[in-house]
């Protein structure tokens, strides 16, 4: 039997601290090389193509994490003007037999894995005393970054910018209702543009569809940390080349960041990357080296992250009886 897990099922079984732990373990064991399980080293593949009209399609396969007896294949379609903008499926298979264990909503899995992995990177690289977070692009991924950061450090204030001001206000109000976890209020400002966000906050999270950079070196004060999530495929860019050259830049995979991410999309090469988040988390590479330094985390998104959270969701759903069972062979 295959378990079908939609968005509402996933929101019920996933929790932020457990997912953060699973992602931290994955970065430490898989690292940036997308290594496989056991004695084999199987590289994951990312296949992307444009569709007629405004959409793109991407497949990520296979996803492997040491210690997890399964793999995933994910198929996504992205349509920037739609809500939700990302639609697709994550198929969870038994590693030994290929049995289809579960089919999961990829929009939810992607938002959780991208946002919480970015929360880890942001927390590791930002100055520890910073408690005010800026958001450019008030969508699901930025929401999960802020939720993850709130589990890792105190967040006292938010400055939010979105092309839709009502969406920015709703984003801030949702986090005011959620609170800080210690009973303190979260102060929210709706910012006029990305530069205002950067002026107000020591941490800036960008999660947009931008195809022209939103921030340059002149916009960003010393000591700021920026996490750029939007530059995850060719043609997309949120930060200028001069800003990235000036900053200490970390990625999730150097080759992908050059081929289809924040570095290559503005004409920069692998030498501009100081290292990967996996190397920082395991102590192989130092993160921030001075309080006045500008740091950047610019991931593309790695397939193993889908497996890490899909396996958690599958395991929790079986234990709690959530989801819908379906016999594909009947």
Image (cartoon, rainbow, N blue to C red):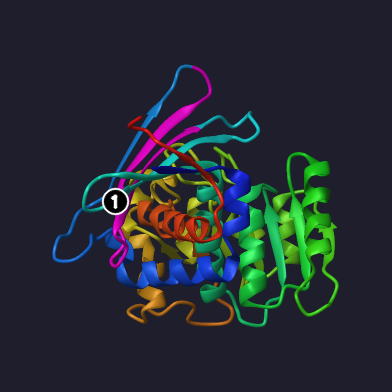
Residue 157 vertical position relative to residue 260 in the rendered view, above or below: below
Q: Position of residue 120 (x, y in %)?
A: 52, 69
Q: Residue furthest front?
A: 330
Which residues fall within the magenta stretch? 53-77
Give percent across and percent down for residue 288. Answer: 49, 78
- Locate residue 205: give its quadrant: bottom right
Question: Whole-percent x and y of residue 39?
Answer: 14, 66
State which quarter of the image contains the C terminus.
Answer: top left
Tell whether position 70 is magenta: yes
What predominant SS class does the magenta segment belong to? strand
The residue singled out by tag 1 in the image is 94
Residue positioned 50% across, 26% down in the render: 55
The residue closer to the viewer here, 11 or 263, is 11
Task: Report x, y in % for residue 295.
Answer: 52, 69
Residue 51, by quadrant, is top left
248 left or right of 320? left
Q: Depth check: give the residue in front, 162 or 293.
A: 162
């Amino acid at each position: 039997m295959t378990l079908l897990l939609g968005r509402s099922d996933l929101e019920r079984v996933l929790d932020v601290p457990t997912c953060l732990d699973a992602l931290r373990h994955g970065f430490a064991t898989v690292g940036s090389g997308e290594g496989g399980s056991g004695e084999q080293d199987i590289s994951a593949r990312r296949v992307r193509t444009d569709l007629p009209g405004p959409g793109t399609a991407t497949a990520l396969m296979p996803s492997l994490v040491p210690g997890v007896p399964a793999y995933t294949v994910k198929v996504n379609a992205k349509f920037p003007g739609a809500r939700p903008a990302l639609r697709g499926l994550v198929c969870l298979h038994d590693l030994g037999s290929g049995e289809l264990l579960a089919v999961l909503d990829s929009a939810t899995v992607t938002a959780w894995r991208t946002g919480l992995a970015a929360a880890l990177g942001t927390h590791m690289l930002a100055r520890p005393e910073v408690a005010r977070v800026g958001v450019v692009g008030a969508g699901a991924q930025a929401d999960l970054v802020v939720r993850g950061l709130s589990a890792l450090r105190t967040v006292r204030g938010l400055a939010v910018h979105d092309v839709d001001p009502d969406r920015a206000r709703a984003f801030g109000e949702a986090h005011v209702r959620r609170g800080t976890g210690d009973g303190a209020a979260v102060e929210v400002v709706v910012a006029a543009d990305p530069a205002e966000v950067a002026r107000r906050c020591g941490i800036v999270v960008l999660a947009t569809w931008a195809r022209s950079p939103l921030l340059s070196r002149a916009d960003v004060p010393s000591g700021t940390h920026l996490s750029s999530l939007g530059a995850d495929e060719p043609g997309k860019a949120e930060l200028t080349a001069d800003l990235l050259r000036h900053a200490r830049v970390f990625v999730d995979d150097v080759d992908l960041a050059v081929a289809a991410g924040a570095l290559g999309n503005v004409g920069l090469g692998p030498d501009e990357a100081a290292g990967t988040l996996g190397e920082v988390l395991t102590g192989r590479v130092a993160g921030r080296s001075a309080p006045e330094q500008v740091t950047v985390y610019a991931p593309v998104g790695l397939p193993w992250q889908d497996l890490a959270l899909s396996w958690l969701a599958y395991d929790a759903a079986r234990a709690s009886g959530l989801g819908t069972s379906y016999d594909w062979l009947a």
